[in-house]
Image (spheres, rainbow, N blue to C red):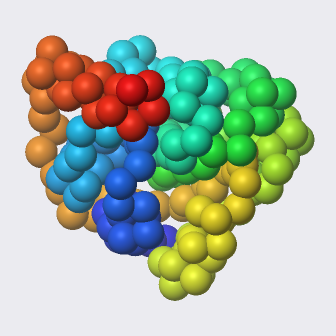
Amino acid sequence: MTMKRDQALRMLSQHYPDGIVVPVYQSAFDWMGIRPHPLNYLCTGAMGQGSSHALGLALACPEEPVVVLDGDGSLLMNLGSLVTIADQSPRNLKHFVCQNGIYEVNGEFPIPGKNSIDFAAMAVAAGYEEAYTFAEIDAFSRALPKILATPGPIMIALQVEAGETFPRDYPAIHSAQTRAAFKAALAARCIG
């Protein structure tokens, strides 16, 4: 049985209530509803850039934990980031990918290789320290505290399906106010 994305994100929010998060596309909309926070970096822009932006934040703020909530379609647009992340080896980066086999916010078209792609294996081959795949919420719940406490970079592939529906608030994601709030929160935490 596949877990619901909102279940997995709620579980993560319980164990990670106050760190930098780079959520993309549907995960961003869900995350905004589950854990609204000024350290949610909602400004990735083009599809596929979440992992690269998270790497930049992890390198700029090495004492702060950084989580990226990628999508499978989004990560496919930038697979080379796995090698770059592994090469830079940020110990503070955890790379979650919500794997549902579709470009969800872009028309629900299937992604290439949706039935065979193994992001955890790709991450290990690229040089990530560890990688996991979870399809059940109980297994994910048991492993999550250890994963968050282990130095990265770590890939966590979450085989999910849509759960609770959250509004697709594009104006909030792209607003100047959201960027300003993130910039101020980031400055207070790791620059100031």
Evaluate whether residue 1 shows in this view: no
Q: Residue at x 78, y 35 (%)?
A: 89
91 to the left or right of 36: right
Residue 131 sits in quarter? bottom right
Q: Position of residue 106 (x, y in %)?
A: 32, 29
Q: Residue at x 71, y 44 (%)?
A: 91
Out of 183 and 28, give the one closest to the viewer.
183
65 is higher (above) or lower (below) than 183: below
Q: Residue at x 63, y 56 (%)?
A: 156
51 is higher (above) or lower (below) than 127: above
Residue 29 sits in quarter? top left
Out of 17 and 45, give the one closest to the viewer.
17
148 to the left or right of 182: right
Evaluate whether residue 49 shows in this view: yes
Q: Looking at this rendering, what residue extends furthest in the front direction? A: 192
Quadrant housing the C terminus:
top left
Out of 111 and 154, give the one closest to the viewer.
154
Q: Position of residue 48 (x, y in %)?
A: 51, 23
Q: Position of residue 180 (x, y in %)?
A: 20, 20
Q: Position of residue 154 (x, y in %)?
A: 70, 51
Q: How many marks?
A: 0
166 to the left or right of 56: left
Q: Residue at x 25, y 55 (%)?
A: 35
97 to the left or right of 176: right
